[in-house]
Amino acid sequence: MYIRLFLITSSLTLAGCSPLSTNTSMYSVHQPVVQRTNFVIDLASDGNGIASSDQNRLNAWFDVLGLGYGDRISIDNVDGYVPNEAYRDVAAAAQKRGMLITETAPKTPGEIAPGNIRVVVTRAQASVPSCPDWSTTTETNFNAGNHSNHGCASNTNLAAMVADPEDLVRGRESSRLDRNSGKAAVNAYKTKTGGN
């Protein structure tokens, strides 16, 4: 009787020491996380737009940042109104790099001096910070749970390959929901090839 009780107690103690997988669903607990970083530069703006020396600073700053798809450029001012001439100069520098200006600027620390505008570049980056996770082993998986590293490869690859990380947060609305658009393409093909 004492021997059986000792064996049961020791086996329960050993089972309690080993980590058990608790995720028994098909979903991964490791999900991509999107982090945004704001880069700012303040430029002097008079009634004729941005001073030529500050235009050179702006162009050099854009080059150093290496603007690309997914980056968002916005302009902020003390009273929220950006003069048309200053907007024109920033938009011209952005268009040289294939970028557009977004309407609203995010909140940034620090005050904008009177007579200046603040150009903000917002960049999002996706990653899975909890991967890799090798905290459990398959030998101690007594409850048919997923391995602790389950989903790390696919979600890390997704975070690395997505062109615009903001799409992982909000998704993207379809700009055109027209059922006849496909029909028009087929009709144009039939007309061109003479098919039925």
Image: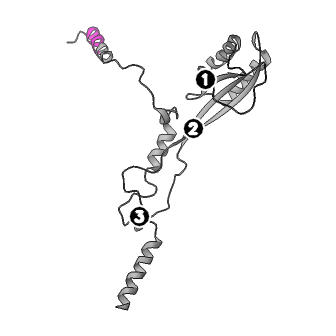
Q: Secondary structure at mark 3?
A: helix
Q: Where's residue 139, x and y in %?
A: 40, 67
Q: Specify the quadrant of the image occupied by residue 173.
A: top left
How dense is the environment of label 1, judged by Cα within 10 Å: few (below 14), some, or many (20 and up)? Answer: few
User: Badge 2 is on which residue?
Assistant: 125
**Residue at screen point 69% across, 14% down:** 89
User: Is residue 157 shown above or below 62?
Assistant: below
How dense is the environment of label 2, judged by Cα within 10 Å: few (below 14), some, or many (20 and up)? Answer: some
Q: Where's residue 58, x and y in %?
A: 72, 22
Q: Are marks 3 and 2 in contact (CB under 8 Å)?
A: no
Mark 3 belongs to which amino acid? Answer: Thr
The magenta-colored residue range is 186-193
Q: Nearer the viewer, residue 53 or 105?
A: 105
- Residue 104's tag is 1
Mark 1 belongs to which amino acid? Answer: Thr
Magenta region, main secondary structure: helix
**Residue at screen point 38% across, 91% down:** 2
Q: Where's residue 127, x and y in %?
A: 54, 43
Earlier in the chain: of badge 3 and badge 2, it is: 2
**Residue at screen point 41% across, 24% down:** 174
- Residue 138's tag is 3
